[in-house]
Image: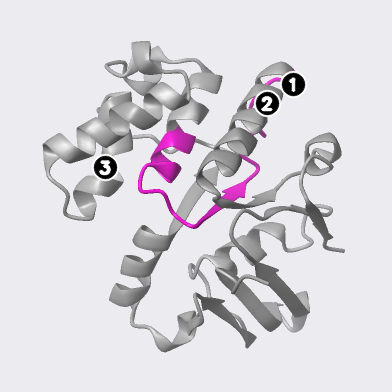
């Protein structure tokens, strides 16, 4: 079996609400290997987004551990966590979070520029991934000039431009109509197969969830 890219052991997370404690996650164990396709499902408030934040090192558990390539997130400084996230993970959200003043090309090139690549290399790589998601004719357009599905494809391209081992996606098709959602989801599966990138996707859509290899249901 391949060594996991990302895994958690006995993961627990709770929140305080006045005098009471709300337990969101308890003793959760998950292992994510190269090429895995995992759907996280469950009702609102069951901890799906919380789990994604913990896996991505954006939040800390009350107990348990999350490891990225065997390194415990909690042993790293914030600077080192940021560096590891930028290198090892891609993030896609329900809202695209594109920078409105920049073109599709510039938005997708941004992670590479932040990683220290030259403008030429960053833009060339960004152009290639935008072509793969079918947006070669839209690279000079700003987000306001793109449809909802196009904006989400730009966001997916941005998440994959540095070829991370794993992409964490939180309701990536939640703001799209059914037909566009199916196309965007299919694109993510195609890119998963092409790059062997692991996908961990939070979704309410069980039709989409059943197209994944594994379903983790939170209660």
Q: In screen coordinates, is 70 left or right of 88?
A: right
* Quadrant in which the C terminus is drawn: bottom right
- Give the number of the disc on residue 110: 3
Calculate the distance from the C-alpha at mark 3 to the C-alpha at mark 2: 25 Å
Bounds of the magenta span? 155-178
Contact between marks 1 and 2 (CB within 8 A): the answer is yes
- Reply above or below: 86 against 149: below
- Reply above or below: 1 against 49: below
User: Is label 3 in a helix, a strand or a loop?
Assistant: helix
- Crowding at dot 2, Cα within 10 Å, few <14 / some 14-19 / many 20+, comes out as many
**Which of these two is toward me, 137 or 132?**
132
Residue 175 position, x and y percent, is 63, 29
- Give the number of the disc on residue 181: 2
Q: Is residue 158 magenta?
A: yes
Instruction: Tell me the residue that label 1 is attached to.
Output: 178
User: Is label 1 in a helix, a strand or a loop?
Assistant: helix
């Amino acid at each position: 079996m391949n060594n996991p890219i990302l895994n958690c052991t006995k993961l627990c997370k709770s929140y305080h609400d006045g005098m009471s404690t709300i337990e969101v996650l308890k003793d959760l164990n998950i292992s994510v290997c190269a090429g895995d396709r995992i759907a996280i499902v469950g009702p609102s408030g069951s901890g799906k987004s919380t789990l994604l934040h913990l896996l991505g090192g954006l939040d800390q558990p009350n107990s348990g551990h999350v490891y990225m390539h065997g390194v415990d997130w909690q042993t790293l400084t914030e600077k080192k966590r940021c560096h590891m996230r930028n290198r090892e993970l891609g993030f896609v959200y329900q809202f695209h979070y594109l920078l409105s003043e920049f073109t599709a090309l510039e938005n997708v090139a941004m992670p590479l520029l932040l990683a220290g690549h030259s403008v030429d290399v960053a833009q060339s790589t960004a152009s290639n991934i935008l072509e793969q998601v079918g947006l070669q004719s839209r690279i000079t357009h700003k987000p306001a000039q793109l449809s909802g599905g196009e904006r989400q494809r730009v966001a997916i391209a941005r998440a994959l431009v540095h070829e991370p081992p794993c992409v964490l996606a939180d309701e990536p098709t939640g703001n799209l109509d059914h037909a566009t959602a199916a196309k965007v989801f299919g694109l993510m599966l195609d890119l998963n197969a092409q790059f062997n990138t692991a996908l961990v996707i939070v979704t309410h859509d069980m039709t989409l969830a059943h197209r994944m290899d594994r379903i983790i249901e939170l209660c």
